[in-house]
Image: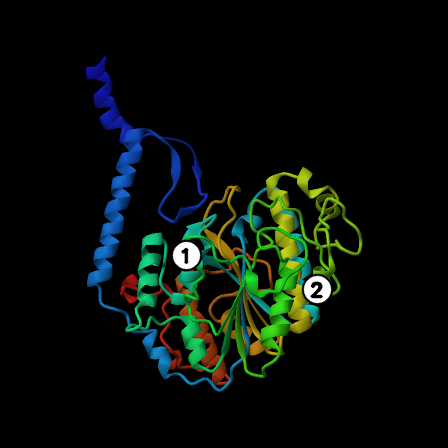
Amino acid sequence: MHLAAWPLVAVVGPALELGPVNMTYQSSGERTRVRTTTARAVANARASLRLQTMLDSMRTAPVDSAYAAYDTLALNRRPSIYLLMVESYGSTLNAHPSLRAPYRALMRRTDSVFAANGWHRATARSDIPVRGGRSWLSIASLLTGTRVGHQLLFNQFQAAADDSTRTVPHLVRFLDGQGYRTVALQPFTFERPGLPVRNLYDFDVPTYRDDLNYRGPSYGLADAPDQYSLHHTHETHLTPSPDPFFLFFETVDSHSLWNYGLPPYLDDWARFNEQTEATRSPHPNAESFPPVFLPDSITAPTIYDQPTPLRYLRHVAHELRVLREYLVEKAPPGSLVLLLGDHQPPLIDSANRTVPLHVLSTDSTLVAHARRHGFTEGFLPTPESPTLRQEGLYSFLVRLLAAHDRGAAPADTAALPPLRPRGVPPSLLVP
């Protein structure tokens, strides 16, 4: 029996994988199924070889200097910029059988509100290097213009950032050089044992959980709801200066497991600090929980009684309402907004790793430049909406700003800053 069984384990085992693909908290090349021990050992060895190949290329590949060339730009027209990364806002919303119809209704109504308030909108998709988690890798890919799909590469980037003799180019540093006041709002970031808080991208004003002066009841992971965090940061750090600003906001309200209940939406965000007890979605009322552009069949039931996909949709709808009403009420005229997800949601099946990517502005010329890259009209993704790689958004944004600075769409696009739709090799990030 042993003579018959062990050859089968050695030969058949490496190819044996059972069960559905689990895309939760996995990087782009890892799809975990129920595997035999042999299959897992072989997969581990292959992954190790891929990482070793990547490390070798990082040490030997020449550095692409495209981003260094951005330092020669001098922008005269500098709209304020919002980079809003909505936690777990994934393309599965437009594909999941129980989410597609209500999500599309939500986006059509959201689009109509922006249009009625003079906002121009265009939509694409962004291909993210992670699924269901590890948002810091998604953020690093966007800001550095390099695909950071492994924690090992991120650690290399951190080491380079700690080296005072090296300067790694990235989006925040570029905007700082153009005279922008750069502000980071990350309400879920706080110092923990073994995990210090680091201003990795050198924002002028990093704003974390303990910087929000929040005294109200706890709503979810960050204590403060996103409505409070966003408006507090606007009043404290954005309005006091007339200089153009860049706000990076990593939202929290839509963070899984979507089991905290929805926070209320208050007419006056400062009233959160007056509350002594959290008012949550199990007890909806017209004042705290007005319609969020979802059908009554979804908003009427108590959120805790609903299946995971619908709880997820309701949290995303609430998050979009917070951002929508803030932008309509408070964003400076002519601001440029990039609104996208950080990754697909965990716990919900997804066929790919893309997230919606929206470009908005009350200045039609800014959105027109996005449409020249294939972005489709409106807020709802369509089959024609293009897919941009996350690491290509750095050069896309710089190129858009440079084209806008000229005041028109130049016929000779070769004179614009170099575009890197696939980013640059990771050798840029190593110390």
Report the front residue among 318 and 77: 318
Q: Colour scheme used in the picture? A: rainbow
- Kindly state the secondary structure of the residue where label 2 is placed: helix
Relative to residue 40, is residue 181 depicted above or below?
below
Residue located beneath label 1 in the image: 137
Q: Is residue 21 left or right of residue 329?
A: left
Quadrant containing the C terminus is bottom left
Number of labelled discs?
Answer: 2
| Residue 12 placement (x, y as % from top left) | 27, 27
| Residue 246 placement (x, y as % from top left) | 52, 73
Q: Amino acid at mark 1?
A: Leu
Q: Residue furthest top?
A: 1
| Residue 121 placement (x, y as % from top left) | 59, 68
Task: Residue at 72% x, 51% y: name it.
Answer: 277
Q: CA distance from mark 2 to mark 1?
A: 31 Å
Quadrant containing the N terminus is top left
Q: Amino acid at mark 2?
A: Trp
Residue located beneath label 2 in the image: 269
Q: Is residue 364 left or right of residue 38?
A: right
The nearer-to-camera label among 2 and 1 is 2
Query: Which mark sits nearer the N-terminus, 2 or 1?
Result: 1
